[in-house]
Amino acid sequence: MDCIHLTGIRCYGYTGYLAEEQVLGQWFEVDVRLWLDISTAAKTDAIEDTLDYRSVISLIQHLVKTSKFALVEKLVTTIADSILQECDRVTKVQVTLSKPAAPIPDFGGKISIEVTKSKSNL
């Protein structure tokens, strides 16, 4: 199966366990891998025969910007489920959601959560 990678989708959102995260917000970064058959598009060179990934980027940005969950686990799962529901051609998706600046004292790294789902998981 073929795979399209979309990386570095940065969005400002309001998901977080701490109250200030849901009020002040923070930056998130999302990477996705989308499994689908691109063989027809490779022959026809027509956007209609593949996934227009601009729609996936818009969907992710909308979900991150408008969701107010306590846990990033809920947000990353919502993104994966929404992609599978909205994109008929996608048979499997892997979503990695990162918080580049987690509000943890003396921690300068980032926290990432990865979810992999297929149509059969819905």
Image (cartoon, rainbow, N blue to C red):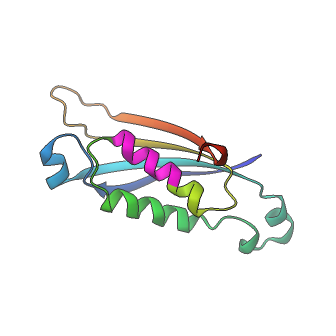
Q: Is residue 98 visible?
A: no
Q: Is residue 83 left or right of residue 77?
A: right
Q: Which residues are magenta?
A: 72-81
In the rendered image, residue 80 lying in the magenta stretch gets the answer yes
Locate residue 86, reporting x and y percent: 57, 63
User: At 70% from the left edge and 60% from the top edge, which residue is drawn?
Assistant: 89
Name the residue furthest right.
43
Q: Is residue 109 left or right of residue 43?
A: left
User: At 65% from the left edge and 49% from the top edge, which residue is drawn?
Assistant: 119
Prevailing SS of the magenta stretch: helix
Q: How many marks?
A: 0
Locate residue 121, reporting x and y percent: 61, 43
Among the 4 quarters of the image, the one containing residue 38: bottom right
Name the residue furthest top.
106
Residue toward you, 45 or 94: 94
Residue toward you, 94 or 54: 94
In the rendered image, residue 27 lying in the magenta stretch gets the answer no
Among the 4 quarters of the image, the one containing residue 43: bottom right
User: At 79% from the left edge and 71% from the top edge, which residue is drawn?
Assistant: 45
Locate residue 17, reporting x and y percent: 21, 40
Among the 4 quarters of the image, the one containing residue 52: bottom right
Q: Is residue 10 left or right of residue 116?
A: left
Locate residue 47, reporting x and y percent: 71, 72
User: At 84% from the left edge and 64% from the top edge, which residue is drawn?
Assistant: 40
Q: Is residue 95 visible?
A: yes
